[in-house]
Each structure stands twice: as structure tokens, then as C-alpha cells.
């Protein structure tokens, strides 16, 4: 992180674990969606999900069908994928509308009025836009709210190409994929630990020389 937060032209936020306390909700949803294939398969799905934080549900369930239950999924894979997605969505929706949002979010917006804000998430784009509208905070993100099925890499490359993301730009995330996507795009990165499910994150941040904070409120208080 090379600048004070107020000096960045663009702030890019992940959603789950950064703006909303949804990580555990979604982990449980992955387990429940895949449980009909057995507890071992569901636990394997959870382990893959946790090891690949920030990756879209589409890619995670495709991995589940191809690599975790290939014998079950050899026939009608498309319909099985659609069923998994529907079950997952039904488990997630109520939770993401009622879960905690990041403390200090609107105060941070007031500190960064000259910056463009945007969300780049692994969550479904249509759902994200609806959720943030219902929660009454969609207007904070004047640069747009983007999600899957496009990957974070694809979204960042597209929005940089269109000029929506202008440097200096900062990505605020809570997963290793967030860091990788930010690095590929040439964005500064801050890791937020409070709701992250990255194991041994302190060691990882130290190894990669990544600036970390507990949450957005901490970012505002310490560097704004």
C-alpha cells in the first residue's frame, strides 16, 4: 500500500468478508448444497471452497462435479450444476440480506469523496446488485457492482480498459485470490482479516509483505 487511503483515485472492494459478514454463510451453503452426495463429498467441497476464496460459485461447483463426484456427475452434468446453484442460492439469500455490514463503511466514503468506488466480487452479479440495493448502500459504489460469472481477473482487465479503474487504485480483499487478481492488474492491495477464512493469514501477509488491517473501520482510523 503506497498511498494514504484518501489519495487513491479508485477503491475496489471484494464483497464477502470485506463489505458483508457472509463468509460463514456461504461456506455452510456450499456444504448443504453438496450434502446429498454424502458427507465426505460435502466436506471436500468445503475444503476446496476455503482453499479458493474469492473464486465464483460457478467454478467451484464445476470443480465439484468434475473432480469430487465424477462418477455421479458423468451424466447430465449441466442439470446437476443448475440444481447445485439453486440450492446454494436458496441457502445464501436470506443470510446476506440480514448479516452485518462493515463498520465504518459510510464514514470511509466521506473520507474518500474524490475516489471512485466499485465492487469486484466472486458472487453472482445480479444478486449482488439486488442485495446492495435492498440494503440501501448501492449508491456508495459509483464505479459499479460487478461479479460472476465473469472472474475478478476479467472484470479488472475490462474496467481498467474502459477507464473505470484509474490508478492509483487500491483493492481491499480478504482472500489469496483477491491478492493475486490485484497483483496481476497492477493494483495496490490491503488484506482485511476480521471475517477472512484464510488460514495462517498473518504468516502469509508477512511472507508476501502485504499490508493488513482488521476491517474497514481500522483502515479509516489508521491511514485516512
Image: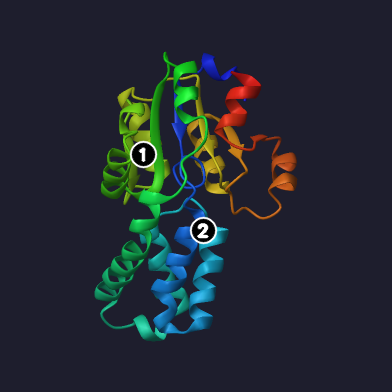
Q: On the image, numbered disc 2 is attached to which residue?
A: 24
Q: Position of residue 29 (x, y in %)?
A: 42, 66
Label 1 or label 2, whichever lies nearer to me, is 2
On the rendered structure, is 38 left or right of 140?
right
Q: Quadrant of the C terminus?
A: top right
Is residue 2 visible in this depiction of the protein?
no
Q: On the image, numbered disc 1 is attached to which residue?
A: 155
As drawn, 12 above or below 56: above
On the rendered structure, is 156 left or right of 186?
left
- For the point 50% across and 54% down, the residue is 23
- For the point 46% across and 41% down, the residue is 101
Where, by quadrant of the figure, is residue 156 drawn?
A: top left
Q: Regarding mark 2 in the picture, which secondary structure is present there?
A: helix
The chosen color scheme is rainbow
**Callout 1 crowding tier (Cα within 10 Å): few <14, some 14–19, many ≥20:** some
On the rendered structure, is 166 left or right of 205?
left
As rendered, which of 192 and 72 lies closer to the eye? 192
- Mark positioned earlier in the residue sequence (1 or 2): 2
Q: Position of residue 196 (x, y in %)?
A: 58, 49
Q: Position of residue 27 (x, y in %)?
A: 49, 62
As drawn, 42 above or below 194: below
**Callout 2 crowding tier (Cα within 10 Å): few <14, some 14–19, many ≥20:** some
Where, by quadrant of the figure, is residue 221 drawn?
A: top right
- For the point 43% across and 63% down, the residue is 60
As drawn, 92 above or below 71: above
- For the point 26% across and 69% down, the residue is 82
Disc marking residue 26: none
Is residue 15 visible in this depiction of the protein?
yes
What's the distance in space between the residues labelled 1 and 2, CA to CA? Answer: 25 Å
Amino acid at each position: 500500500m503506497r498511498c494514504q487511503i484518501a489519495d487513491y483515485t479508485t477503491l475496489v472492494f471484494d464483497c464477502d468478508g470485506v463489505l458483508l459478514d457472509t463468509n460463514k454463510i456461504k461456506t455452510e451453503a456450499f456444504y448443504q448444497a453438496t450434502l446429498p452426495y454424502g458427507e465426505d463429498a460435502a466436506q471436500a467441497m468445503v475444503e476446496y471452497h476455503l482453499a479458493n476464496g474469492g473464486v465464483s460459485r460457478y467454478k467451484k461447483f464445476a470443480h465439484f462435479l468434475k473432480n469430487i463426484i465424477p462418477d455421479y456427475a458423468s451424466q447430465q452434468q449441466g442439470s446437476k450444476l443448475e440444481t447445485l446453484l439453486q440450492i446454494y442460492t436458496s441457502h445464501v439469500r436470506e443470510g446476506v440480506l440480514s448479516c452485518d455490514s462493515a463498520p465504518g463503511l459510510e464514514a470511509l466514503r466521506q473520507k474518500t469523496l474524490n475516489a471512485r468506488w466499485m465492487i469486484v466480487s466472486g458472487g453472482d452479479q445480479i444478486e449482488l446488485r439486488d442485495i446492495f440495493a435492498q440494503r440501501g448502500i448501492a449508491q456508495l459504489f459509483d464505479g459499479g457492482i460487478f461479479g460472476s460469472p465473469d472472474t475478478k481477473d476479467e472484470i479488472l482487465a475490462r474496467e481498467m480498459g474502459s477507464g473505470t479503474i484509474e490508478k492509483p487504485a487500491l483493492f481491499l480483499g480478504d482472500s489469496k485470490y483477491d491478492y493475486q487478481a490485484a497483483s496481476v492488474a497492477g493494483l495496490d492491495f490491503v488484506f482485511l482479516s476480521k471475517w477472512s477464512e484464510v488460514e495462517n493469514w498473518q504468516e502469509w501477509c508477512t511472507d508476501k509483505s502485504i499490508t493488513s488491517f482488521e476491517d474497514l473501520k481500522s483502515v479509516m482510523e489508521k491511514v485516512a
